Amino acid sequence: MTADTLTVTDNRTGTSYEIPIENGAINASHLRQIKASEGDFGLMSYDPGFLNTASCHSRITYIDGDVGILRYRGYPIEQLAEESTYLETTYLIFHGELPTAAELEDWSWNINHHTLLHENIKKFIDGFKYDAHPMGTLVSSIAALSTFYPDSKNIFDPESQRKQVFRLMGKIPTVAAFVYRHAIGLPYAYPDNDLSYTGNFLNMLYKMTELKYSPDPVLEKALDVLFILHADHEQNCSTNAMRNVGSSQTDPYSALAGAAAALYGPLHGGANEMVLRMLAEIGSTDKVPAFIKGVKAGEGRLMGFGHRVYKNYDPRAKVIKRIADQVFEVTGRNPLLDIALELERIALEDDYFIQRKLYPNVDFYSGLIYQSMGLPVSMFPVLFAIARTSGWLAQWIEMLEDPEQKLARPRQLYLGSDVRDYVPMNRRQAA
């Protein structure tokens, strides 16, 4: 018997099994050998929500939620947010190493020169009602892009993969900006490839009649940092969706549309919107203690606190809190900030929340920044999707290169009726 094994005794039969442990996990398929009888399918693990199931190997993102660590390819998120840019960080996520100056220039040029959309996509967006949710329009538009690039079906061709990465990372900010302009009834502002990635996005959002838009450097940097913080986050709901849909060997546009659809949900990409609603409902700092009391009594939820992974202060929230003050110097102080600060202060001193390891997460402050930049809450998950596109695509490529990955097809525990005979209509009784 070796040290790196798990010995399991099936008390139904008295038989013991030795299962290898690799990288701190057992292969679930090894449980199939544990059977109560000859015709038994074999033991399965039951894990709704994947609370303790690893579905893949990955070398991209590392999280230690107990101590509040987030790293991309080994680099702490705090260092990347302080020193790097979004496009440099995306190069790191895809390639595993930080780029040289020449590599970054080539990477940035290719992304920034794939920003234009086919005019038919613009017509496609025009077909949506003005009050259609921006995320619904974005998801549909991403899926529609797959019909414009049939070469994207060559998913195992490295050159084709690289081309689709440039296209998607370049075009999604344009789609997002066009969706926003359509919703507010403004003509589309086309990309300006002389600007940075986030500067160009601000240009497409806010340009009016000026010949050349000049983004505010503080807002440009803040958006760049927010994009870095959201670039990847291990096997979250939308990334898992990207891998699951991609496992059918569909094109990356279709897979990414599925990932964006998963992000659409309020428990994922819409969480910062829920924070703003909560702060608005509280209304003023003097009402925070009563709100906290209601949460502890089970009469409401403290949005923006706690996380499936983090059982400590979300490292991304610390970074966002620092840049919020810089943004508010430009945009003016968001009136909800004082409520948020008071809420955080009281909650972090209360044993009820400390014992439950409920700390602020990335959504607690990000919505305040987006709102101060003049963006409606319906655009928040769209901004999230722009940033997360790099992580989705890097995870998709990693999945394609992993020989152990197969078509995603989880098992189920069937609890329905056993076999029964069909009953003619005239012999049935009401349930």
Image (tube, rainbow, N blue to C red):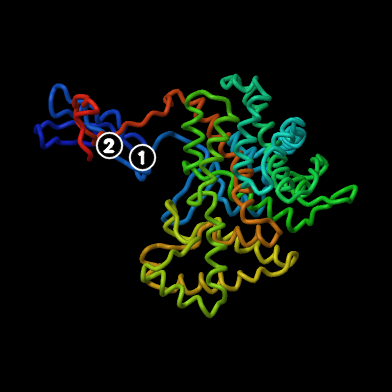
* Residue at left offset 18%, top offset 31%: 17
Residue 3: give x, y in percent of width and height: 25, 36
Which residue lies most toward the right here? 211
Furthest toward the bottom, the residue is 286
Q: Is residue 102 visible?
A: no
User: Amino acid type of disc 1?
Assistant: Thr
Viewer-proximal residue among 218 and 383 = 383
**Crowd around label 2: few <14 · some 14–19 · many ≥20 (10 Å):** few
Q: Residue at x 40, y 35 (%)?
A: 55
N-terminal label among 1 and 2: 2
Q: Which mark is residue 13?
A: none
Figure label count = 2
Q: Is residue 301 above or below residue 422?
A: below
Residue appearing at x 65%, y 35% in the figure: 141
Say which of 343 and 28 sits in front: 343
The answer to whether residue 108 is left or right of residue 214 is: left
Q: Nearer the viewer, residue 74 or 252?
A: 252
Q: How busy is the neighbourhood of tag 1: few (under 14 within 10 Å), some, or many (20 plus)?
A: some
Question: In terms of image quadrants, where is residue 188?
Answer: top right
Q: Secondary structure at mark 2?
A: loop
> Which image quarter: residue 342?
bottom right
Relative side of 90 to 220, left or right: left
Residue underneath mark 1: 53
- Mark 2 = which residue? 45
What residue lies at 41% left-to-right and 75% top-to-bottom?
A: 293
Quick check: 316 left or right of 404? Answer: right
Measured as percent of width and height from the top left, residue 304 is found at 50, 60
Q: CA distance from mark 1 to mark 2?
A: 9 Å
Q: Are marks 1 and 2 in contact (CB under 8 Å)?
A: yes
